[in-house]
């Protein structure tokens, strides 16, 4: 049928999935595609399990929005990836400006990760426990966690998550680690250090927010290098952006780029699945973040009727034929 998750599973992968957000779940035409587990076998909440959404003030946890996404996945027989426990962004100011000493911040991190991961115990296939901890040059990001706790926040978060849900795969997730280089090396070194000190870590997430025509030549070998460390690898936030308005040449190149990504994951046993950072341009984060850029998702931004019939980009879903 050419549906994405069915094709991924036929290729021996665990899933092909999509991010989504709560406000999108009232869009019937959108949901009709998202809920099809032959198309999307996995769901990631784009926002509703982040720190600002789940613990907006200290010790007060709210899971209503996160639960809506988790329940959607459960109802439709889809895996859930939790996203995320510890990130410098979308972090409430009570954490970022709190002025906590190291022992207090450490217990805040542990309590946050333990409570959030524990709330979804048994429901999440995986969690992005650590998100975007490094700079592009491979040094640690100067955020409240690193500046207060040094590198120890990573183990604190991972151990709390493991205790809270022993069956969830615990991931380090980042961008610009899709190619070999200083940042990928830093994440590889972190994985080695964690493993040698018996800190639980199960996977590395390559966000994979790509630019059309610029899938790194070392993408596949880099996936293999991560997998060789004894962790699984997932493509966690795939999109392929271009300058707007899109041209047919760029859309054709994008089709090849998506195929390149899928083929690279398929070629490495340890690459277990791919998640697009929402499936339609209608709900892509790209235009809000990269000025003048867009058309990044596998489905176009089209009218409701066109969305349902996939009419505007001819050939879809063959533009991401998984094999
Ligand atoms: C994005 C969401 O898609 C947006 O809705 C939000 O405004 C900002 O965050 N890397 C990540 C994701 O790990 O959490 C980000 O998601 C995109 C970049």
Image: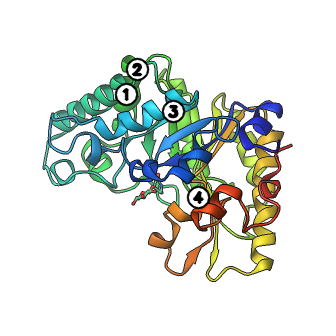
Between tags 4 and 1, which lies in front?
A: 1
Q: Which mark is residue 121?
A: 2
Rounded to the nearest angstrom, the CA distance separating label 3 from label 1 is 16 Å
Query: Eyeballing the image, is 309 above or below 36?
Result: below
Give the residue pinned by disc 1. Answer: 117
Rounded to the nearest angstrom, the CA distance separating label 1 from label 2 is 6 Å
Give the residue pinned by disc 4. Answer: 176
Q: Is mark 1 within 8 Å of ligand 1?
A: no
Q: Which residue is drawn at 77% across and 62% down?
A: 257
Residue 88 place in picture, x, y as percent: 34, 52
The mark nearer the N terminus, 3 or 2, is 3
Give the residue pinned by disc 3. Answer: 73
Q: Which type of secondary structure does the marked residue at label 1 adopt?
A: helix
Residue 302 place in picture, x, y as percent: 61, 68
Discs 1, 2 touching: Cβ within 8 Å: yes
The mark nearer the N terminus, 4 or 2, is 2
Rounded to the nearest angstrom, the CA distance separating label 3 from label 4 is 28 Å
The number of callouts visible is: 4
Rounded to the nearest angstrom, the CA distance separating label 4 from label 2 is 30 Å
Mark 2 Cα shell of 10 Å, populated few (<14), some (14-19), many (≥20): some
Q: Quadrant of the C terminus?
A: top right
Between tags 3 and 2, which lies in front?
A: 3
User: Can you see residue 98?
Assistant: yes
Between tags 3 and 4, which lies in front?
A: 3
Between tags 4 and 2, which lies in front?
A: 2
Query: Eyeballing the image, is 13 above or below 260?
Result: above
Residue 215 place in picture, x, y as percent: 73, 62
Q: Which residue is drawn at 80% across and 38% down?
A: 7
Discs 4, 2 touching: Cβ within 8 Å: no
The mark nearer the N terminus, 3 or 4, is 3
As rendered, which of 58 and 293 lies closer to the eye? 293
């Amino acid at each position: 049928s050419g549906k994405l998750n069915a094709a991924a599973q036929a290729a021996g992968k665990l899933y092909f999935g999509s991010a989504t957000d709560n406000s999108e779940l009232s869009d019937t035409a959108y949901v009709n595609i998202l809920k099809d587990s032959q198309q999307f076998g996995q769901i990631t909440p784009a926002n509703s399990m982040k720190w600002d959404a789940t613990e907006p003030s200290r010790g007060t946890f709210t899971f209503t929005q996160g639960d809506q996404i988790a329940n959607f996945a459960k109802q439709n027989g889809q895996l859930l990836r939790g996203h995320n426990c510890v990130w410098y962004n979308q972090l409430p100011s009570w954490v970022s400006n709190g002025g906590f000493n190291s022992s207090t911040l450490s217990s805040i991190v542990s309590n946050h990760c333990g409570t959030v991961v524990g709330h979804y115990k048994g429901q999440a296939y995986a969690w992005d426990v650590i998100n975007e901890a490094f700079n592009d040059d491979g040094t640690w990001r100067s955020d409240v966690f690193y500046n207060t706790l040094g590198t120890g926040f990573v183990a604190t978060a991972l151990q709390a998550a493991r205790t809270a849900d022993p069956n969830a795969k615990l991931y380090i997730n980042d961008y610009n680690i899709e190619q070999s280089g200083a940042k990928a090396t830093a994440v590889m070194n972190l994985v080695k250090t964690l493993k040698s000190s018996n800190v639980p870590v199960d996977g590395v997430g390559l966000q994979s927010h790509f630019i059309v025509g610029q899938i790194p030549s070392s993408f596949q070998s880099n996936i293999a290098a991560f997998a060789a460390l004894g962790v699984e690898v997932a493509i966690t936030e795939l999109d392929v952006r271009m300058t707007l308005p899109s041209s047919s040449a760029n859309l054709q190149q994008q089709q090849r780029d998506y195929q390149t990504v899928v083929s690279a994951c398929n070629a490495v046993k340890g690459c277990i699945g791919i998640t697009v950072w929402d499936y339609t341009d209608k709900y892509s984060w790209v235009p809000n973040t990269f000025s003048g850029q867009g058309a990044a998702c596998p489905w176009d931004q089209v009218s409701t009727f066109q969305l349902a019939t996939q009419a505007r980009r001819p050939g879809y879903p063959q533009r991401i034929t998984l094999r």
